[in-house]
Each structure stands twice: as structure tokens, then as C-alpha cells.
Image: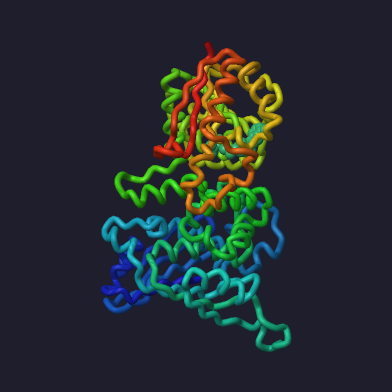
Amino acid sequence: MLLTIATTHSPATELGYLLHKHPDRCQSFSLTFGQAHVFYPEAKPELCTAALLLDVDPVKLVRGRSTRLEQYVNDRPYVASSFLSVAIAQVFGSALSGRCKDRPELAQTPIPLVAKLSVLPCRGGESFLRQLFEPLGYTVSAQGHTLDEEFIDWGQSQYFTVELQHTLPLGDLLSHLYVLIPVLDDDKHYWVGDDEIEKLLRHGEGWLTKHPAREQITRRYLKQQQRLTRLALAQLAEEDNPDPDSTEESHAQEEAAVEKPISLNQQRMNAVIAALKQSGAKRVIDLGCGQGNLLKILIKDIFFEQVTGVDVSHRALEIAQERLDRLRLPRNQWERLQLIQGALTYQDKRLSGYDAATVIEVIEHLDLPRLEAFEKVLFEFARPKTVVVTTPNIEYNVKFENLPAGKLRHKDHRFEWTRQEFHNWANKVAERFNYNVEFQPVGTEDPEVGSPTQMAVFIAK
Ligand code: SAH
């Protein structure tokens, strides 16, 4: 199995710095499934080609397992597959992540590159190969191979010799190959678990969300496992489709171009954390935690001793769990975290025993007639000392250019309130359940319509 990468960037031999492999040397690396060799068939200032040759050992692959003949005799040693992705990550790891100690700026610079794969299995044929690489800007040439020249009517094999040409940073080329080779092969040589999503998102960063074949890529990359595919696609959709509030806010801030833009979401989180700290709450329950925006901040801050997230949506909780896993916190910090699936409109013992509850952009998702049930669950039964509630201020919606007049900010919102309506509701709740309440604007305040988000902090009397 052979991959070559050539450049005509001048001087072309700088490819050696980018790959961290000296053009004058031939180096070998031991991998679990065989040997990888790196060498340069040519290294001139006008053209430099690096080669990665994989010598997959079919005997090593099956050692210790029950064996069948096809486990020894198959195409794996000869074709580009997930073995090549592993070799790219292990042998060209820093280049893959876009790092280069000696030429840091060159690692980020688009340079003319040609990658050639001697045998690439393309399940889905040449058209699928093109669907994967052409939207990324590559010029693709593919030479097909007949199954057997003596038996022409057996037709074409699924193997192609492929040349991919593009001007881009080397790390981008390696990331595309890392993800798309196993996708074309539609197989992986190892067990695919939850951490595979993290790899896909990391190496797909900056291109996968916008790729027209992202669903197929994700499904095949995750070996058709439905749960993993669903999680990954939800995460990609989230990255591609940011909260309209925060998009709008960051546009506004770009115009102002003063300070580093902070999204409305971030400002909301900052305001909530400040309110929690001011109240001295150590044990916090986030009701309607969604995909864990606030949990992520709470769990990283050791001020908070216990952090619980509750949501009715199992899918949101799965995504929250994935995102929190990616923080890679030490085990003793994890013990502070708990995720619970539950509805906020039914009395639930698991919601009791906290210093504070946060309800961030959630009440507007509840049907108005169910709001009273929620008030009882939270303020009467769970009864934390502090409750922080945020909700959109509908008056501010006229400021969102991309929001048609009269529309609510999200299609799942059952209502959005004016400042007066929110104050009326919060004052009524405070009085009924014996709390004090104070209000605070969140986000840049407009003299006429107020701030985009409104916040109420309730403290039990
Ligand atoms: N607090 C999060 C998510 C806000 S979106 C953030 O600020 O990012 C609203 C969340 O409330 C969704 O995740 C939705 O699943 C959850 N939700 C809506 N109705 C609910 C109910 N009755 N019980 C529990 N969670 C609910």
C-alpha cells in the first residue's frame, strides 16, 4: 500500500519540515499491524515527493484469533484503508494536526499538493469518490482496474488508482485523507466506539459540517452504527447552526468591532455563573440543561461541588455527555457530575437537595397551561435557596434583522415575554412561594427595547 504526496511549492524540499521527516533519510516505524516506511523518491527544490509505504502483516493481524482462510488472504495488505489512516496519525501526527515547529506559518499556508494512492477501494465507485473530494476543491483523476484481464466480462473492480490535486495546507490534505479513505473503503479494522465520534469531529473540523455528503461520510465513518451516527450528526448540525441569538449578537459586535466579541450565549452563562457565585451555591442543578452549555462551565469550575443536569430529551443528554467527555477531566472531578432524564412538570425527588437551580432558556419551551405545574415542582417541592431563570425578551426581537416581524426566536418556543410580562410572572411566583426576586438584563441593553435576554434571581426568604 503506497501513498505519495508531492509538492511544487518553492523550495519543495520544505515538505521535509512539514512532515517532520528528513528528505535524505528512509525511516521505518513499527505499528501494531505491520511496518510503515517513509522515504522521498525525489527531493529537488522544484519538486519533492514523500512516500508512505505500508507493509501490513496479515499473519500479525489474525494472531490470537480464530482464523479462517479469508482472514489471511484478503486485500488488506495492498489497499488504502483504515490502516493508512492510523499510519498517517502515527507517522505524520503533527502534520495532520497542522503543527510544524520549524515552519509554523508554512503549515497554515496553502501549497500546491498532489496525493497519489496506488490502490484505493471505492465502494460506491468513481462517482462516490468524486462526490467526496470534488466539493473540497480537489481535481480528481481516477484510473479503474478490471477484475481480471482474461475475463473482461467480469467487469470492473472497486479498486482505483487515484490522484488528488489541490492547493491547500498540508494538514487539511492529511485530514481529508484520514477521514475519507476509510469512508470510501466502508470498513474499519478496529472496533468503533464512542471515541470515534470525537476523532471524526476533530479531523472533520472546518470542512465536514459544510460537506454535501456529510451524512454518508458520518454514517460510513462510524461503521453504520445508528446511535453514533445520530449523535455525530446532531453535533455537526449544532456546529453548523448556531443559536440565532448568539449569531445576531456576534454580528452586532462585529459591527461595533470594539472588544473581542462575546456571544449572547456566553454573556448569559457569565451572568448565571456570577449570580450563582454571589449566592454562594455549591450544589447546582441545571433544569432543562439541553446539550450542556452551562454544565460544561460548571464542571470545569471547582467552586461548584455538585453539578446535575436534567432534561426531558434523551438525545440532548447523550450529546451533553459526549461534549463533557471531551473535556477529559480527571476522574475525581467527574464524580461531581450527574445527568438525569426527567420532566420538569412532574414532582421528582431527584430535584431536591440543591443550593441552587438554573432554568436557562427553558420556560418558553413549556406550554403555558403547564407552567404552573413547573412552578410547584421547582419552588414548592424542590425548593432550592436560589433559582436563576432566563428567558428571551420579546421586545428585543425587532433588533434581529434575520427574524421576520412577529416570529419567535425558535420554532419550539411556546411564548416569549415582554419585560413587563416576565416581571409580573416572577413577582407572582415569588410572592406565592415566599421568595425575593431581582431582575437583571443580559446582553447589550437598548434604551427602548431593553436587553436580548432577561434574567430573574429568586432567593428563598
Ligand atoms: N438550558 C440549555 C438548553 C435550552 S433549550 C441552554 O441554555 O443551552 C430548552 C431545553 O429544555 C431543551 O433541551 C428541552 O429538551 C428542555 N425541555 C423542554 N421542556 C422540558 C420539560 N418539560 N422537562 C425537561 N426539560 C424540558
The reply to whether residue 212 is visible in this rendering is yes
Q: Nearer the viewer, residue 352 or 377?
A: 377
Q: What is the count of numbered marks?
A: 0
Seen in the picture, residue 20 relative to 255 is either above or below; the reply is below
Residue drawn at x 43%, y 46% is: 249
Image quadrant of ligand 1? top right
Percent coordinates x, y for residue 304 in the rendering? 46, 24
Q: Nearer the viewer, residue 331 or 28?
A: 331
Q: Nearer the viewer, residue 61 or 108?
A: 108
Q: Nearer the viewer, residue 243 or 126?
A: 243
* Residue 347 occupies quadrant: top right
Percent coordinates x, y for residue 45 in the rendering? 27, 76
Side (left or right) of 76 relative to 152: left
Residue drawn at x 28%, y 60% is: 105
Percent coordinates x, y for residue 426 in the rendering? 56, 24
Seen in the picture, residue 174 relative to 330 is either above or below; the reply is below
Seen in the picture, residue 322 relative to 439 is either above or below; the reply is below
Residue with the most extreme top position: 461
The reply to whether residue 321 is visible in this rendering is no
Percent coordinates x, y for residue 214 in the rendering? 58, 61
Residue with the most extreme front position: 448
* Residue 130 occupies quadrant: bottom right
Side (left or right) of 395 relative to 7: right
Side (left or right) of 401 relative to 424: left
Residue drawn at x 65%, y 64% is: 72
Image color mode: rainbow
Residue drawn at x 54%, y 78% is: 161
